[in-house]
Amino acid sequence: MSQASDVDDLFKLPPGEFTAARNALAAKLKKSGRDEEAGRVKTLPKPPASAWAVNQVYWRHRKPFDQLLAAGERFRKAQAAQLAGKSANLRAPLDERRQALSALSKIAADVLREHGYTATPDTMRRVNTTLEALATYGSHPGAPPAGRLTYDVDPPGFEALTALVPRGSRAGLKGTEPTRVIPFQRKAPEPRAGKKKKLDPKEQARHDAEERKAQLAAARAAVQEAERTLRAARKAAAEAEGALKKVAAKAKDAERVKAGIEKKFEKASADADAARLEARRVASEAEDAAQAVEDAERALDKAKKELA
């Protein structure tokens, strides 16, 4: 088995088994003379519950996960078309991505509960934020490593978000090591080489207006998505709070029933003790009565013999 497969297997394990398995893999690599790889494995941090849940969604529910990435890609293309001045419908891909996020959020909550975690509002907020970030980055160079997350991921900022959307002749970013945020790259100004023809003031104004319009469109799209994410997070928090109240009410009812049963049990135990004492008393009186009958019969026999 390759080292990559071994590392992937680490992130598929339950959280309680991660550290021991990681140390064992590092020792195995070191023993085989692969000290550098062993060192990298040894420093892998244990993912928090939220990042772990997202990793499990990636490994165990790949189809809906890929649907989320596909929805994110369609949203980026719509943004690119809008930035290029073309007519584009952002609502449909946004709705599609929101539905995919909601479906994966429920799956992640089930995964957490399945392994003994509580899907608290804060944990689900971090899960949703990380899923949203992965949908935004997609398969872009520098995207966080889906399935191997060791931290919660924040969505890219406005500038980094703009860098993710192709504009004009810009075809993307150069490959970099995985980072949390893809750096925004501005087009470097061309060096001066002699006299350069200046744009007509009207042309320059039109160019500046188009640039501002494109930036404003991207900013509005980012704000709309942030607002949708916030609403979804608030809804999830409200649902979790409602579920918590229901569980608390059930627990209170169960405690009340338990207290009633315990009280009845105590009374039944006291009645049983009293009944046992009464039975012993009656048994003793019965023995005394039987003895008295026997003594009377013996006295009667003696008296008959004397009379004869």
Image: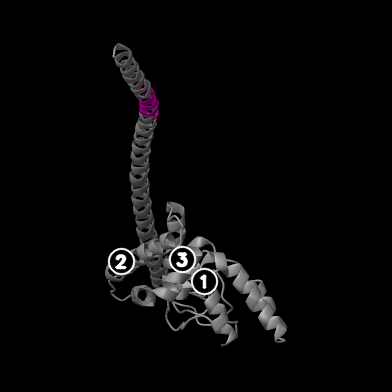
Task: Name the N-terminal-most of marks 2 and 1.
Answer: 1
- For discs 3 and 2, the disc positioned in front in the rendered view: 3
- Which label belongs to residue 99? 2
| Inter-mark Cα distance, 1 to 3 | 11 Å
Q: Residue furthest front?
A: 308
Camera-nearest residue between 80 and 307: 307
Instruction: Identify which residue is drawn at 57% across, 81% down.
Output: 6
Q: Amino acid at mark 1?
A: Leu
Q: Which residue is mark 1?
A: 13
User: Dot 3: few (<14), some (14–19), or many (≥20) neighbours within 10 Å?
Assistant: many
**Count of marks overlaid on the render:** 3
Sequence order check: which comes first, mark 3 or mark 2? 3
Residue 274 in the magenta stretch? The answer is: yes
Task: Tell me which numbered mark, 1 or 3, is placed earlier along the sequence.
Answer: 1
Label of residue 142 in the image: none
Tell me if residue 37 can be seen. Answer: no
In the structure shown, which secondary structural element does the residue marked by tag 1 occupy?
loop
Quarter of the image where the N terminus is located = bottom right
Tell me which corner region of the image, top left, top right, bottom left or bottom right, holds residue 190.
bottom right
Residue 234 sits inside the magenta stretch: no
Residue name at image x 46 percent, y 75 percent: 164
Q: Tell me the amino acid under the disc marked 2.
A: Gln
Q: Amino acid at mark 3?
A: Ala
Q: CA distance from mark 3 to mark 2?
A: 19 Å
Of 50 and 134, nearer the camera is 50
Q: Which residue is mark 3?
A: 53
Observer-side mark, 2 or 1, equals 1
Question: Is there any visible trace of residue 126 in the rendered image?
Answer: yes
Q: What colouring does the structure picture have?
A: one colour
Q: Is residue 33 above or below residue 286?
A: below
Q: Residue at x 59, y 78 (%)?
A: 177
The residue under the point 36% across, 73% down is 68
